[in-house]
Image (cartoon, rainbow, N blue to C red):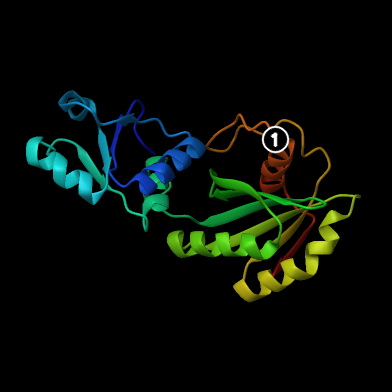
Amino acid sequence: MKPAGSKNVVAICNPKLMSTFKSLSDLMDIQYKIFELREDLHEADTLLVDKECFELIERSHDVSKVRIVMISEDNILAKLLELVGVSKVETLVIGVDPGNTLINYVIFANNVLLGYGSLKKFQDLAEVLSKIRNSLHPGRVVIKVGVSPAGFWESYMSEVLRIVKEDRYTLVLVDESSTTDVCPMTYVGRKDLKNPDLRACINIALKEGFMKITY
Protein backbone atom coordinates (compact mmCIF):
# COMPACT_ATOMS: atom_id res chain seq x y z
CA MET A 1 0.00 0.00 0.00
CA LYS A 2 1.26 3.49 -0.82
CA PRO A 3 2.44 5.53 2.17
CA ALA A 4 -0.05 8.00 3.63
CA GLY A 5 0.43 11.42 2.08
CA SER A 6 2.57 10.17 -0.81
CA LYS A 7 2.60 12.58 -3.77
CA ASN A 8 2.31 11.48 -7.38
CA VAL A 9 3.57 13.76 -10.16
CA VAL A 10 2.65 12.89 -13.74
CA ALA A 11 4.43 13.71 -17.00
CA ILE A 12 3.01 11.79 -19.98
CA CYS A 13 3.65 13.22 -23.44
CA ASN A 14 1.52 10.73 -25.39
CA PRO A 15 -1.99 12.31 -25.53
CA LYS A 16 -3.81 8.97 -25.85
CA LEU A 17 -1.86 7.48 -22.95
CA MET A 18 -2.49 10.59 -20.85
CA SER A 19 -6.21 10.34 -21.53
CA THR A 20 -6.19 6.70 -20.42
CA PHE A 21 -4.22 7.65 -17.30
CA LYS A 22 -6.74 10.34 -16.35
CA SER A 23 -9.71 8.00 -16.82
CA LEU A 24 -8.17 5.18 -14.78
CA SER A 25 -6.95 7.53 -12.05
CA ASP A 26 -10.44 8.93 -11.74
CA LEU A 27 -11.89 5.43 -11.37
CA MET A 28 -9.28 4.32 -8.85
CA ASP A 29 -9.40 7.66 -7.01
CA ILE A 30 -5.66 8.24 -7.44
CA GLN A 31 -4.53 11.76 -6.55
CA TYR A 32 -1.81 13.34 -8.69
CA LYS A 33 -0.29 16.61 -9.93
CA ILE A 34 0.72 17.38 -13.50
CA PHE A 35 4.46 18.16 -13.78
CA GLU A 36 5.05 21.83 -14.51
CA LEU A 37 7.93 23.18 -12.40
CA ARG A 38 11.20 21.95 -10.94
CA GLU A 39 9.63 22.25 -7.48
CA ASP A 40 7.09 19.58 -8.42
CA LEU A 41 9.89 17.00 -8.50
CA HIS A 42 11.27 18.15 -5.14
CA GLU A 43 7.87 17.57 -3.53
CA ALA A 44 7.09 14.31 -5.32
CA ASP A 45 7.45 10.77 -4.02
CA THR A 46 6.65 9.20 -7.40
CA LEU A 47 7.07 10.43 -10.96
CA LEU A 48 4.77 8.65 -13.41
CA VAL A 49 6.19 9.23 -16.85
CA ASP A 50 6.29 7.84 -20.36
CA LYS A 51 9.54 7.35 -22.27
CA GLU A 52 9.28 10.56 -24.31
CA CYS A 53 8.65 12.84 -21.33
CA PHE A 54 11.29 11.11 -19.21
CA GLU A 55 13.97 11.78 -21.81
CA LEU A 56 13.01 15.47 -21.84
CA ILE A 57 12.88 15.82 -18.05
CA GLU A 58 16.15 14.07 -17.21
CA ARG A 59 18.08 16.40 -19.53
CA SER A 60 17.47 19.37 -17.25
CA HIS A 61 16.26 17.99 -13.90
CA ASP A 62 17.67 15.81 -11.16
CA VAL A 63 15.41 12.75 -10.90
CA SER A 64 17.69 10.71 -8.64
CA LYS A 65 15.63 11.35 -5.51
CA VAL A 66 12.21 10.46 -6.86
CA ARG A 67 10.77 7.03 -7.61
CA ILE A 68 10.34 6.67 -11.37
CA VAL A 69 7.38 4.67 -12.72
CA MET A 70 7.58 4.22 -16.48
CA ILE A 71 4.10 4.12 -18.04
CA SER A 72 3.21 2.57 -21.39
CA GLU A 73 0.06 1.29 -23.06
CA ASP A 74 1.09 -2.26 -22.16
CA ASN A 75 1.62 -1.73 -18.42
CA ILE A 76 -0.59 1.19 -17.38
CA LEU A 77 -3.21 -1.01 -15.67
CA ALA A 78 -0.63 -2.90 -13.63
CA LYS A 79 1.36 0.22 -12.68
CA LEU A 80 -1.68 2.14 -11.44
CA LEU A 81 -2.90 -0.86 -9.48
CA GLU A 82 0.51 -0.97 -7.79
CA LEU A 83 -0.04 2.64 -6.67
CA VAL A 84 -3.13 1.57 -4.71
CA GLY A 85 -1.43 -1.47 -3.23
CA VAL A 86 -2.24 -4.26 -5.69
CA SER A 87 0.93 -5.98 -6.84
CA LYS A 88 -0.83 -9.14 -7.99
CA VAL A 89 -4.40 -9.45 -9.26
CA GLU A 90 -5.77 -12.60 -7.72
CA THR A 91 -9.32 -12.17 -9.02
CA LEU A 92 -10.89 -10.13 -11.78
CA VAL A 93 -14.58 -9.73 -10.87
CA ILE A 94 -17.21 -8.47 -13.30
CA GLY A 95 -20.61 -7.42 -12.01
CA VAL A 96 -23.26 -7.58 -14.74
CA ASP A 97 -26.76 -6.13 -14.71
CA PRO A 98 -28.54 -7.34 -17.88
CA GLY A 99 -31.22 -4.99 -19.16
CA ASN A 100 -33.79 -5.16 -21.92
CA THR A 101 -31.47 -3.65 -24.54
CA LEU A 102 -28.14 -3.05 -22.79
CA ILE A 103 -25.73 -5.03 -20.62
CA ASN A 104 -24.37 -2.83 -17.84
CA TYR A 105 -21.15 -3.89 -16.16
CA VAL A 106 -18.39 -2.94 -13.74
CA ILE A 107 -14.94 -4.53 -13.43
CA PHE A 108 -12.93 -4.97 -10.23
CA ALA A 109 -9.31 -6.07 -9.96
CA ASN A 110 -9.24 -7.59 -6.49
CA ASN A 111 -11.08 -4.81 -4.65
CA VAL A 112 -10.23 -1.92 -7.00
CA LEU A 113 -12.73 -0.41 -9.45
CA LEU A 114 -11.13 -0.77 -12.86
CA GLY A 115 -13.86 0.02 -15.36
CA TYR A 116 -17.55 0.25 -16.17
CA GLY A 117 -19.83 0.67 -19.14
CA SER A 118 -22.78 -0.53 -21.19
CA LEU A 119 -22.72 -2.86 -24.19
CA LYS A 120 -25.25 -4.57 -26.42
CA LYS A 121 -23.66 -8.04 -26.56
CA PHE A 122 -21.82 -10.25 -24.10
CA GLN A 123 -19.29 -10.94 -26.83
CA ASP A 124 -18.26 -7.28 -26.67
CA LEU A 125 -17.75 -7.62 -22.92
CA ALA A 126 -15.74 -10.79 -23.49
CA GLU A 127 -13.36 -8.83 -25.75
CA VAL A 128 -12.90 -6.16 -23.06
CA LEU A 129 -12.16 -8.85 -20.48
CA SER A 130 -9.72 -10.61 -22.76
CA LYS A 131 -7.60 -7.46 -23.13
CA ILE A 132 -7.57 -6.85 -19.38
CA ARG A 133 -6.76 -10.47 -18.61
CA ASN A 134 -3.84 -10.44 -21.06
CA SER A 135 -2.52 -7.28 -19.39
CA LEU A 136 -2.94 -8.26 -15.74
CA HIS A 137 -2.80 -12.09 -15.82
CA PRO A 138 -5.26 -12.55 -12.92
CA GLY A 139 -5.44 -15.82 -11.02
CA ARG A 140 -9.07 -16.20 -12.05
CA VAL A 141 -11.92 -14.31 -13.72
CA VAL A 142 -15.37 -14.35 -12.14
CA ILE A 143 -18.45 -13.06 -13.97
CA LYS A 144 -21.35 -12.32 -11.62
CA VAL A 145 -24.70 -11.92 -13.37
CA GLY A 146 -27.69 -10.33 -11.65
CA VAL A 147 -30.88 -12.41 -11.74
CA SER A 148 -34.28 -10.75 -11.32
CA PRO A 149 -37.97 -11.63 -11.89
CA ALA A 150 -37.91 -9.40 -14.99
CA GLY A 151 -35.95 -12.21 -16.64
CA PHE A 152 -33.75 -10.10 -18.92
CA TRP A 153 -30.77 -12.27 -17.96
CA GLU A 154 -32.35 -15.41 -19.45
CA SER A 155 -32.01 -14.23 -23.06
CA TYR A 156 -28.24 -13.78 -22.58
CA MET A 157 -27.45 -17.04 -20.84
CA SER A 158 -26.56 -19.20 -23.84
CA GLU A 159 -23.98 -16.62 -24.95
CA VAL A 160 -22.69 -16.19 -21.39
CA LEU A 161 -22.26 -19.94 -20.91
CA ARG A 162 -20.42 -20.25 -24.22
CA ILE A 163 -17.98 -17.47 -23.30
CA VAL A 164 -17.45 -18.81 -19.78
CA LYS A 165 -16.69 -22.28 -21.14
CA GLU A 166 -14.39 -21.09 -23.95
CA ASP A 167 -12.37 -18.69 -21.76
CA ARG A 168 -12.40 -20.83 -18.58
CA TYR A 169 -14.11 -18.18 -16.48
CA THR A 170 -16.29 -18.76 -13.41
CA LEU A 171 -19.96 -17.78 -13.66
CA VAL A 172 -21.90 -16.79 -10.53
CA LEU A 173 -25.61 -16.00 -10.50
CA VAL A 174 -26.56 -13.30 -7.98
CA ASP A 175 -29.97 -12.32 -6.62
CA GLU A 176 -30.53 -8.80 -7.90
CA SER A 177 -32.86 -7.78 -5.08
CA SER A 178 -31.97 -4.42 -3.47
CA THR A 179 -28.88 -3.99 -5.65
CA THR A 180 -29.84 -0.45 -6.68
CA ASP A 181 -29.48 0.62 -3.04
CA VAL A 182 -26.41 2.42 -1.69
CA CYS A 183 -23.17 0.61 -2.51
CA PRO A 184 -20.84 -0.62 0.23
CA MET A 185 -17.78 1.54 0.84
CA THR A 186 -15.36 -1.36 1.10
CA TYR A 187 -13.88 -1.15 -2.40
CA VAL A 188 -11.12 1.14 -3.67
CA GLY A 189 -12.21 3.72 -6.24
CA ARG A 190 -14.96 6.19 -7.01
CA LYS A 191 -17.96 6.08 -4.69
CA ASP A 192 -20.06 8.76 -6.41
CA LEU A 193 -21.48 6.89 -9.43
CA LYS A 194 -25.06 8.18 -9.81
CA ASN A 195 -26.39 5.73 -12.40
CA PRO A 196 -28.60 3.18 -10.58
CA ASP A 197 -27.70 0.48 -13.12
CA LEU A 198 -24.00 0.92 -12.34
CA ARG A 199 -24.72 0.90 -8.61
CA ALA A 200 -26.55 -2.38 -9.20
CA CYS A 201 -23.49 -3.74 -11.01
CA ILE A 202 -21.22 -2.81 -8.10
CA ASN A 203 -23.52 -4.48 -5.59
CA ILE A 204 -23.79 -7.57 -7.79
CA ALA A 205 -19.99 -7.75 -8.05
CA LEU A 206 -19.58 -7.51 -4.29
CA LYS A 207 -22.50 -9.79 -3.35
CA GLU A 208 -22.47 -13.54 -2.71
CA GLY A 209 -24.17 -15.63 -5.37
CA PHE A 210 -26.59 -18.52 -5.14
CA MET A 211 -25.18 -20.60 -8.02
CA LYS A 212 -21.62 -21.02 -9.33
CA ILE A 213 -20.49 -22.66 -12.58
CA THR A 214 -16.79 -23.28 -13.16
CA TYR A 215 -15.15 -24.93 -16.15
In the depicted structure, whether residue 41 falls above or below residue 97: above
- In the current view of this chain or complex, which residue is farthest to the right? 149
Residue 192 horizontal side relative to residue 8, left or right? right
4 left or right, relative to 123? left
Which residue is most to the bottom? 166
Choose between 127 and 172: the one closer to the eye.
Answer: 127
- Provide residue 57's location: percent of width, then percent of height: 15, 39
| Front residue of 133 and 210 | 133
Tell me what residue is drawn at x 60 percent, y 72 percent.
167
Q: Residue at x 59, y 31 (%)?
A: 191
Q: Hey, which residue is sitting farthest front in the picture?
A: 15
Q: Position of residue 210 (x, y in %)?
A: 80, 55
Quick check: 7 left or right of 65?
right
Residue at 61 percent of width and 32 percent of height: 185
- Expressed as whole percent of the image width and height from the top left, the position of residue 151 reads 88, 55
Helix, strand or loop at mark 1: loop
Mark 1 belongs to which amino acid? Asn
Query: As displayed, is residue 124 above or below residue 215?
Result: above
Quarter of the picture containing the C terminus is bottom right
Quadrant location of the N terminus?
A: top left
**Observer able to see residue 182:** yes
Task: Identify the residue under disc 1.
Answer: 195
Residue 19 quadrant: top left
